Image (cartoon, rainbow, N blue to C red):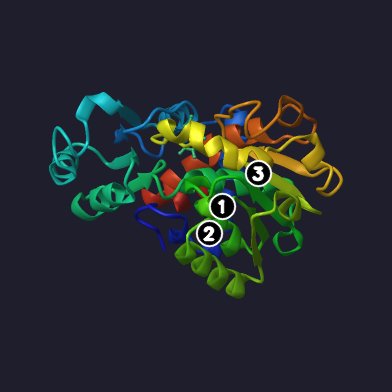
Amino acid sequence: MTTRDYLKSSDFDREKTLELFELAAGVKQQVKQRHFLDLLSGCHAAMIFQKPSLRTRVTFDIGLKQLGATGIYLSPAEISLGVRESVYDVARNLERWVDLVIARVFEQAAVEELAQVGAPPVINALSDDEHPCQAMADFFTLYERGVQWNDFHFTYVGDGNNVCNSLMITGAILGLNLRIGSPARYAPSKALIEQTQALCRASGGSLLITDDPREAVRGANAVYTDVWASMGQEEEAGSRKAFFEPFQVNAELMKLAAKDAFFMHDLPAHRGEEVTDEVIDGPTSLVFDQAENRLHIQKAIILEVMDQAEAARATF
Ligand code: CP
Ligand code: NVA
């Protein structure tokens, strides 16, 4: 069955997630052979961005073109979603012209409303609560390396933010052994922890929450981190720094992880803050593979919500 919108990580169950990894692997191979599908020929997508972006904007734009569709980029100042015009009115206008809406927003409620009000499928390209496409790209990057989900210790250290939330949900759906190391006041919410625990019970995964970065990293097969202050929190950057300094991923912390543990980051990175150059540029860093895979997994997600996944599979 097709999933119409991708608004939060829990929208794809385990079966759908694995199906999309397989589809992404297929489209990735086709791109390497310079074979592009034309399944969305004549389609148009509105790309609403309330926040800046490099990876998300470029990969959605190229991905749409490779599928035969056109993306119309609407910059933060362009439509001032919810300020110049209500989310409701924006959605009612867009549905008259476009076939897909891709939105990077502050409030999760904005993507939910775009989906509820407007006819076209909506993909969450990051909100304050979630970054579902990022988590899909990250676990697809591990899938390509043949990771056995139930045997894999995946550690996230740092802010319990949007990226952390989506990694927890998709990671739990897949059945990973998750460890989250955050300063207590920046830990993931109780509701999110309970949701993750319930998903772990179904998948055979596990979850440990700690405020000790060393406990989080010990024996980990992958260590993931993100910025200490996200977009929209720039003014808090100074006050947050003191809490997060012990959580910096540096060579000393990585020594506690399993031998040859992967380092992962969604980027942009603040080098010298949450991660040192030595680690991010090290031989087991996956950061640019993760960035590359945004393109391929998002194409699989677009095909899914546009009901073209089967047609794409038929071309392999
Ligand atoms: N990782 C990520 O979403 O990067 P951008 O903010 O540059 O899109
Ligand atoms: N947590 C970061 C992720 C950026 C891709 C932010 O929201 O700014």
Q: Disc 3 beta carbon < 8 A from ligand 2?
A: no
Q: Which residue is mark 2?
A: 169
Q: Is 22 situated above or below 249?
A: below
Q: Is residue 300 visible?
A: no
Residue type, mark 1 in image? Leu
Of residue 117 and residue 169, the one placed in the foreground of this image is 169
* Residue 196, x across and y down, in percent: 54, 65
Q: Which residue bears the numbered disc 3? A: 224
Task: Give the alpha-carbon distance from disc 2 to disc 3, as whole Å.
Answer: 15 Å
How far is the residue under mark 1 from the one under mark 3?
A: 10 Å
Element type at mark 3: strand
Answer left or right for 130 relative to 221: left
CB-based contact (under 8 Å), mark 1 and mark 2: yes
Q: Amino acid at mark 3?
A: Tyr
Residue located 53% across and 64% down the image? 193
Q: What label sits on residue 167 in the rendered view?
A: 1
Q: Upstream in the sequence, badge 1 or badge 3? A: 1
- Residue 194 appears in the figure: yes
> Mark 2 or mark 3: which comes first in sequence?
2
